[in-house]
Amino acid sequence: MSNQDLLKRSQQAVWHPCTQMKSHEQFPLIPIARGDGVWLYDAAGKRYLDAVSSWWVNLFGHNNSRIKEAIKQQLDTLEHVMLAGFTHQPVVELSEKLSQLTGLGHAFYASDGASAVEVALKMSFHYWHNKNRPRKSFFACLHGSYHGETLGALSVTDVAIFKDTYAPLLMQSAQMPSPDWRLAEAGESAQAFALRCAEALEQYVSEHQHELAAFIIEPLVQCATGMSMYHPVYLRRAREICNKYQVHLIVDEIAVGFGRTGTMFAGEQAEIKADFICLSKGITGGYLPLSVVLTKDEIYQAFYDDKVAKGFLHSHSYTGNPLACSAALATLAIFESDDILQKNMQKSDLIQTKMQVLNDFPIQHLRHQGMIFAFDIMTKNQQFSKRFYQAALKQGVLLRPIGNTVYFMPPYTITEGEIDFMLQATVKALQETT
Ligand SMILES: *Cc1c(COP(=O)(O)O)cnc(C)c1O
């Protein structure tokens, strides 16, 4: 099938996500035929370096032989079985591994990030209900938070363009000041600013402790609203505050889990223990949809009862799919056998050093956290994001700025030569757009 043909048919038949479809009259879709390592190849053979890991899911490159092999083996054994009333080896092994890694047992599975957030919100509310505190039915989140697009997750998301249209359908939630250090006052350290934001959080939580079920947070980096980074002391204080006023802390590691911020999970850098952890995106190395909510024994026990209705009667058809679990197990095995976190530390330093070439451009807030790198362009051009995306594609790199923030979230397998390519392409795209 020719490129042109595929584009036309896709526009007719496929409703693409997060897209005003009319924009494709101007900006054509990119038909991808295959992937290999950090590269995506279109039907004509042109290649693009996937510098955003295909929306942050692809940890170890496309066409990864080990993950592929694990799925193939599982495919010959058991492709799927419902998880209500049945179990299987991959889901048990994965749950045990995730419990070892996070200190939280009791893995409840779903298929996408947003559905994991739904699970965590419902579980938190239901816990308080089971504990005879049904008034605790309200959630708090951060300014600029992103937790997904289903109605519950969107209710604790703070992005006007995604949310405003649906306002009549959503639950009320409260937005706490974001500790994003770019918002600190001149001369104020990231840590001092985080502590100041935590004071505001405590003020709010203390006043609403009887209605608040949980505070949901993206640990260390608010990715979707422009890679806002903050000091880990905020997480530590949030944990203390939630303990003090009996409010659950839901830690949404969907974007940052699995090594993105330098540690396996971002919460480790604040030495906190969450009440709920949500995981998805990188969990299968980008191979299959899978998400999971992990929670602690005390919460699990509040549902464990002779009464059916006290149980958590939530399900998705593909809950705990064996193929997805086998991909996740292979992903975790690569972390262990290849010493990924250690190697990423060196790679992170290397990328950071090489990013200094960007200082010749009108940029600010050059920042990084582990394998997330970002900077903001000083421009008033409303079209910057679209123009830069196009310019980078022309240079053979897939980059999707968020507003004026350009970021790299490459697969961990990126080589030094590929890093150079990514940065040279970025320089050329900046020359064209700034
Ligand atoms: C992407 C994301 C989600 C939603 O995950 P989906 O799989 O897209 O539904 C939730 N929380 C965070 C922090 C995310 O980055």
Image: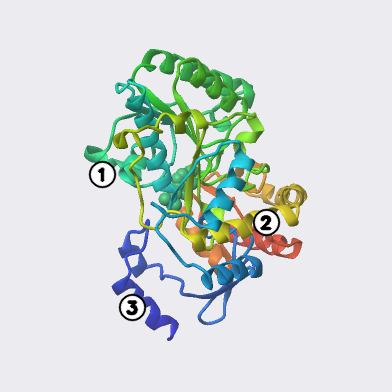
Which label sits on residue 9?
3
Task: Name the mark nearer the viewer: 2 or 3.
Answer: 2
Q: Residues within 10 Å of mark 2 (few under 14, many from 20)?
A: some
* Alpha-carbon span between mark 2 and mark 3: 39 Å
Disc 2 vs disc 3: Cβ atoms closer than 8 Å?
no
Is residue 18 shown above or below 254? Answer: below
Say what amino acid the circle numbered 1 marks: Thr
Q: Nearest the camera: 405 or 432?
A: 405
**Secondary element at tag 1:** helix
**Secondary element at tag 2:** helix
Q: Where the N terminus falls, by quadrant?
A: bottom left
Which label sits on residue 333?
2
- Dot 1 corresponds to which residue? 165
Q: Nearest the camera: 231 or 309?
A: 309
Is residue 413 shown above or below 134? Answer: below
Task: Name the mark nearer the viewer: 2 or 1.
Answer: 2
* Alpha-carbon span between mark 1 and mark 3: 29 Å
Say what amino acid the circle numbered 2 marks: Ala
Q: Residues within 10 Å of mark 1 (few under 14, many from 20)?
A: few
Asked if one can make out residue 185 in the rendered structure from this viewpoint, the answer is no
